[in-house]
Image (cartoon, grey):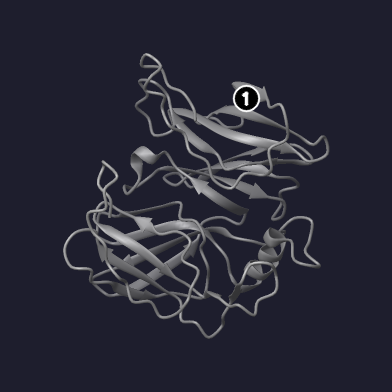
Amino acid sequence: MASAAGEIVRGEVIQGAGPSLMHDFGLTRRHVVWLDLPVVFDQAEHSGIPYRWSDSYTPRIGVMPRTGPAEVTWYEVEPGAMIHVSGAYEDEQGRIVVEGPRYDRAAWTTSWKWWVGAPGHASVPLTGAVQHRWTLDPATRTAREEDLDSLVTEFPTINEAVLGSRHRYSYAIAFPGAGLGEHALVKYDHRDGTRQVAPAGPGRLPGEAVFVPAAGGTGEDDGYLLTIVSDLAEDSSELLVLDAGDITAPPIAAVELPRRVPGGIHGSWIPDEADAGASGMR
């Protein structure tokens, strides 16, 4: 654990069951959420990156208090993998809710070959992760889970001002498949159960959508989304600025970049405090 000044103030060793791929974790107001799921390190894996699906690995999610002893409560869940967490929070009943794109075995195998460029991979991951929710109940030590949508998605983001709290909105990249003919950005409204889909255009691949709050904004989606879109046919890229309130509206701005930027994985926005109170991007 690090302080706001960037100093390490606490460290704990968490006993795992094996060499699982723990690329991300969840954070609520009171808990840390560990994903101990059945994608494991294997030096014999030849797809390009040494991780593979393991049918023998027991999938589970661990919940640990952010303060006090490092006591982890483990919840067994159905076989599935999650690389990136959209968000996590405690609900009104004290249950821990974790959301994000989840892979089943078939989806992991197909999409992983695409991500790492393994021989025989498809041009796009027509099967892949779909939005999923786990609800972990400390009273019963049980987990309930459900799919929230059928779109193939990855790289979820939220307004980081609500990190650890119940979020209404999340954003992600959507891939062709499940009724979608091209790459797109998608915005989920988790309160109303609706979504907005903004297609990127033929042969265009958007990068992770970074939320930027509007100056003086009060609503959770009162701001902008920044995404770098690569045109694979033209070998070019542009930075799009979208209205986070309505991502289907025409872009607020489109900035042509001097050279193509490879498809991005993660991005961050940092306000430029030196610019007389204005906001900037780095």
Instruction: Work out which residue is located at the far front of the displayed protein and give it.
Output: 7
Q: Which residue is mark 1?
A: 251
The image quadrant of residue 250 is top right
Give the left or right position of residue 17, taking residue 281 as reference. Answer: left
Left or right placement of residue 34 versus residue 180 in this view: left
Q: Residues within 10 Å of mark 1 (few under 14, many from 20)?
A: some
Query: What residue is rendered at 69% in x and 55% in y?
Result: 178
Give the residue drawn at x 46%, y 76%. Answer: 59
Against 149, is 263 above or below?
A: above
Q: Along the line of sight, which residue is nearer the eye, 235 or 97? A: 235
Q: Residue furthest toward the top?
A: 276
Q: Residue at x 56, y 80 (%)?
A: 54
Q: Is residue 200 visible?
A: no
Front-lying residue, 249 or 266: 266
Mark 1 belongs to which amino acid?
A: Pro
Task: Give coordinates of residue 227: x percent, y percent.
Answer: 59, 35
Q: Can residue 174 be seen by looking at this rendering?
A: yes
Residue 106, x across and y down, in percent: 66, 72
User: Circle 1 sits in a helix, a strand or a loop, which is it?
Assistant: loop
Hey, which quadrant is residue 234 in on the image?
top right
**Residue 143 in the image: x percent, y percent?**
37, 71
